[in-house]
């Protein structure tokens, strides 16, 4: 078996992938929902992940840490680009500036519209987004 075939061999259940990537099962399923990864399924419908899937999840985690959103991650993954450190820093700074342009009120309204738009969709993907809202709103002590 060649190396590429070995990397695509689905072996890991979600619990192992969670420990390897420090992502929650919810995050991993969220990235699957957005078609960033495509784990194989057993006859019992259990997800099994390959080395390639784990590497992709680590790449996604790194891009999120740099400030990219899901659309940006999809663009980067669809067209692999090698960035040097200066370009990476510039991209991270640009992402920070874009986020800073939205006030908390504007962001709140945007997220509420997004939830309202998704609420009627099949499978209610809004429930996945609701879990992400805590990143944007902080309770006052």
Image (tube, rainbow, N blue to C red):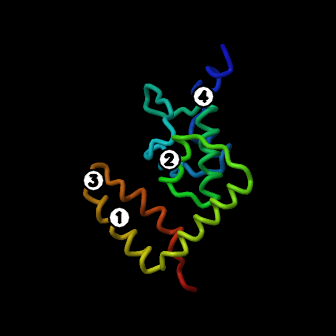
Residue 83 coordinates in the image, percent (x, y): 68, 48
Q: CA distance from mark 1 to mark 3?
A: 12 Å
Report x, y in % for residue 45.
43, 32
Percent position of residue 25, x then y: 54, 48
Image quadrant of residue 124?
A: bottom left
Image quarter where the N terminus lies is top right
Look at discs 4 and 3 and give the one toward the viewer. 3
Looking at marks 2 and 3 on the same chain, the residue that comes earlier in the sequence is marked by 2
**Disc number lying in front (1 or 4):** 1
Residue that badge 2 annotates: 74
Pick the front one: 71 or 58: 71
Task: Report the quarter where the C terminus lies.
Answer: bottom right
The residue wearing badge 4 is: 11
Residue carrying label 3:
121
Are discs 2 and 3 less than 8 Å apart at CB? Answer: no
Task: Report the Cα–Cα distance between label 2 and label 1.
Answer: 19 Å
Task: Give the residue at x 36% y 70%.
Answer: 112
Quick check: 131 above or below 137? Answer: above
Q: Total of numbered circles in the picture?
A: 4
SS at mark 1 in the image: helix
Q: Are marks 1 and 4 in contact (CB under 8 Å)?
A: no
Counting residues from the N terminus, which is met first, the one under dot 4 or under dot 3? 4
Q: Which residue is mark 1?
A: 114
Mark 2 and mark 1 in contact? Answer it, CB < 8 Å.
no
Is label 4 or label 2 in front? Answer: 2
Tell me where residue 110 sits by quadrant. Answer: bottom left
How many neighbours does mark 4 have within 10 angstroms: few (below 14), some (14-19), or many (20 or more)? some
Query: Quick check: 74 above or below 97?
Result: above
Q: Which mark is residue 2?
A: none
Badge 3 crowding class, 10 Å Cα cut-off, few under 14, some 14 to 19, many 20 or more, is few
């Amino acid at each position: 078996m060649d190396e590429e075939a070995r990397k695509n061999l689905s072996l890991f259940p979600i619990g192992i992938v969670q420990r390897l990537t420090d992502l929650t099962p919810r995050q991993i399923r969220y990235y699957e929902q957005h078609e960033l990864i495509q784990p194989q399924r057993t006859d019992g419908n259990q997800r099994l992940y390959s080395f390639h899937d784990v590497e992709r999840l680590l790449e996604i985690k790194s891009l999120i840490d740099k400030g990219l959103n899901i659309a940006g991650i999809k663009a980067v993954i669809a067209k692999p680009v090698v960035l040097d450190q200066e370009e990476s820093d510039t991209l991270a700074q640009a992402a920070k500036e874009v986020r800073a342009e939205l006030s908390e009120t504007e962001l709140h309204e945007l997220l509420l519209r997004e939830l309202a738009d998704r609420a009627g969709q099949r499978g209610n993907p809004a429930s996945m987004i609701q879990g992400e809202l805590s990143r944007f709103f902080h309770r006052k002590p």
